[in-house]
Amino acid sequence: MIRVVLFDLDDTLFAHRAAVESGILAYAAALGAPYGALEADEVVTIWHDLEEEHYHSYLAGDLDFEGQRQARARDFAARHGVTLSDEEASAWFADYFEHYVAAWSLHDDALPALDALERRLPGVRFGLITNGDLAFQRRKVEAVGLDARVDHLIASGEVGIPKPDAGIFRVACDAFGVEPAEAAYVGDRLRTDAIGAARAGLIGVWINRRDAVPSPDDERDAVDAGVRIIRSLDELPPLLA
């Protein structure tokens, strides 16, 4: 019997990618030349690539939280021939961030899935496990109203253990007082979320919203770990029930 369903936050329940795209395009338009020289899809691709690069440097401990923001802003500006100091990079990112916040929302299937899980699994509780800064992630959770639906928010920046390390999944299970086998975890990253959770003893579920094709290694490890795959949260309640 599943007693707890845990979720990743960004791009699982929270529409992070859409907010990032909206935010960077709005900010680039507001800045004007030279930032308006690239096509919209190029702007979005560059910004996403820099987020992946520098946020993972933060998770690895090579940059602090503000440092990865500065690095993203500085490298994006450099692609457009603009040089930023650390202070200017912080200010640049802060201005972008306001555009990003303005676009915050949940995925359309998020709240209906929680409602359906409560109907199918009476007494089920919800939680979040996220790689990131606790205060920043809590701000997003509260802004979109998820704080009323989840009992615990576990952030790697607080516990010092990032996904896919089994330790962070065990911290979450301990917070709920359940064994890993009594919990499911749903996330949009196959290895970081679903394989990591399954190897920690939870039911690992990969939500593949964008029909991504996993690498041969990821596909093999997912099969070995018993990872379930869904393409929408609408598929989650019948899967777990």
Image (spheres, rainbow, N blue to C red):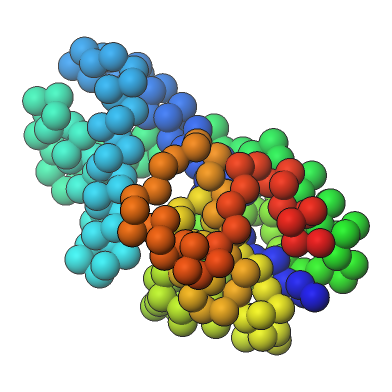
Q: In the displayed structure, does residue 203 sit left or right of residue 196?
A: right
Q: Position of residue 97 (x, y in %)?
A: 41, 39
Query: Which residue lies at the image location 46% right of the left edge and 54% below the top edge?
Result: 189
- Residue drawn at x 41%, y 65% as measured from the top left: 221
Residue 102 visible in the shown view: no
Q: How many marks?
A: 0
Residue 124 position by quadrant: bottom right
Quarter of the rendering occupied by the N terminus: bottom right
Residue 234's x, y, as percent?
A: 73, 44
108 left or right of 112 in image: left
**Left or right for 73, reference 79:** right
In the picture, the quarter occupied by the C terminus is bottom right
Q: Residue at x 78, y 54 (%)?
A: 237
Q: Is residue 45 above or below residue 209?
A: above
Residue 86 seen in the figure: yes
Q: Looking at the picture, how far across and down is residue 170, in whole percent?
A: 55, 82
**Which residue appears at 32% of the width and 65% of the height?**
59
**Above-or-below relation of 196 to 142:** below
Above or below, 151 against 100 in this view is below
Return the x and y of residue 211 as percentages of the image width and height.
50, 37
Position of 80 compared to 160: left or right?
left
